Image: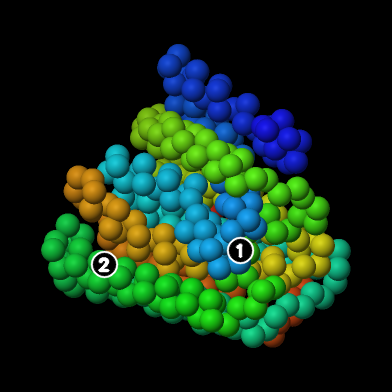
Amino acid sequence: MMQKILRMNKLYWLLIAAPIAIVGEFTHMPPLTLFLLACVALIPLAGLIGESTEMLSERTGPRIGGLLNATLGNAAELIITIVALSRGLTELVKASIIGSVLGNLLLVLGASLLLGGLKNGSQKFDRVRAGQNSTMLLMAMVALSIPSLFSDAIGPDTSVGVEALSMGVAICMIFVYALGMVYAFRSSSSDTPLTRPSAEHAHDAKHLWSVRTAVIVLLIATVGVVFLSELLVGAVEPIVKQFPFITEFFLGIVLIPIVGNVAEHIVGVQVAIKNQMDLSVEISVGSSLQIALFVAPMLVFVSLLFKPPYLTLHFNQFELIAVIAASFITSLVSTDGETNWLEGAHLLVVYVMLALAFFFLPA
């Protein structure tokens, strides 16, 4: 079974880094080397979770498949952040949430527009669907802004008032996400996805796995992600101590989000090159919506399972400004339903500037 899977995607050959990382953990490998090995191994495992979820979706029909995609679409990143929460690294988790949104809206969408535009010229996509996504995206940014703007006046992050505000906003965000699912259920046809399309839809030819195979691959990949996430998160603090110029904030906002979603990111760019911009935009913007409206508020409640400090939705001013700016520029780019390579270059340049600023931002 695994041989067939490996032949389907050369990216999965990176799994060789997993046993090396495991051996490195027991042989006390340098933290930076262990961190990088864990990152490399997580890339194909995240891809396997996405592909097995898609295979189950194909077998179970569009409605149940939509729920599976909505629930497991960002499973790898969710696992990484839960492991970080269990170790009390709430700032790393917050940075990862913002970094995921920035990566999807600026890095992935920017690369898609740039490379797709260079090959195909001006590209068009569904303006109505893009408008709906833009509205939900801006609404999500408003929701994330409310705890960030009001918390300082209420009290410290550990105060009951700030925690209660975050939980209340989180409930509202999950409710909005659920409403979006209900709307998709009622308005979708047999050929319209209920939620953001899985990256694996982009492959023109593929052999469906059996339900048994898909479930086994999903379970194995999930266990692998959990174990490697422990190695990755455990190496963060030693790396920060050993290399003071690398901050926990930078690792969370730039590197970890890319690792958790790189397989889907690659497909988003590939379909843009194939001139399938509707799918490419859905992969980028849809994933950002899922992170903002489902993953982030869900983590607020997951953090209650661990010791304080609990996770709140109180982001610092730099995170807030960056994510709002990214949302607005993405909305402007998608307003007319038409893109070109220059707009992609703009998005990429904004991402690079933000990454540089975050790198030099002191801890």
Q: Amino acid at mark 2?
A: Ser
6 shown above or below 129: above
At 56% from the left and 68% from the top, the residue drawn is 63
Q: Which residue is mark 2?
A: 166
User: In the visual, does 150 lie left or right of 331?
Assistant: left
Secondary structure found at label 1: loop
User: In the visual, does 291 lie left or right of 116?
Assistant: left
Crowd rating for badge 1 (residues with CA inside 10 Å; few <14, some 14–19, many 20+)? few
Is residue 231 something one can see in this rendering?
yes
Is residue 42 something one can see in this rendering?
no
Q: CA distance from mark 1 to mark 2?
A: 36 Å
At 58% from the left and 42% from the top, the residue drawn is 212
Tell me which label, 1 or 2, sits earlier in the chain.
1
The one of 184 and 22 positioned closer to us in this rendering: 184
The tally of labels here is 2
The one of 119 and 263 positioned closer to us in this rendering: 263
- Residue 314, percent from left and from top: 30, 64
Name the image quarter holding residue 142.
bottom left
Which quadrant, please, contains the N terminus?
top right
- Residue 168, percent from left and from top: 25, 71
User: Mark 1 near mark 2, Cβ–Cβ under 8 Å?
Assistant: no
Name the mark nearer the viewer: 1 or 2: 1
Residue 326's mark?
none
265 shown above or below 139: above
User: In the visual, does 129 lie left or right of 121?
Assistant: left
Q: Which residue is mark 1?
A: 61
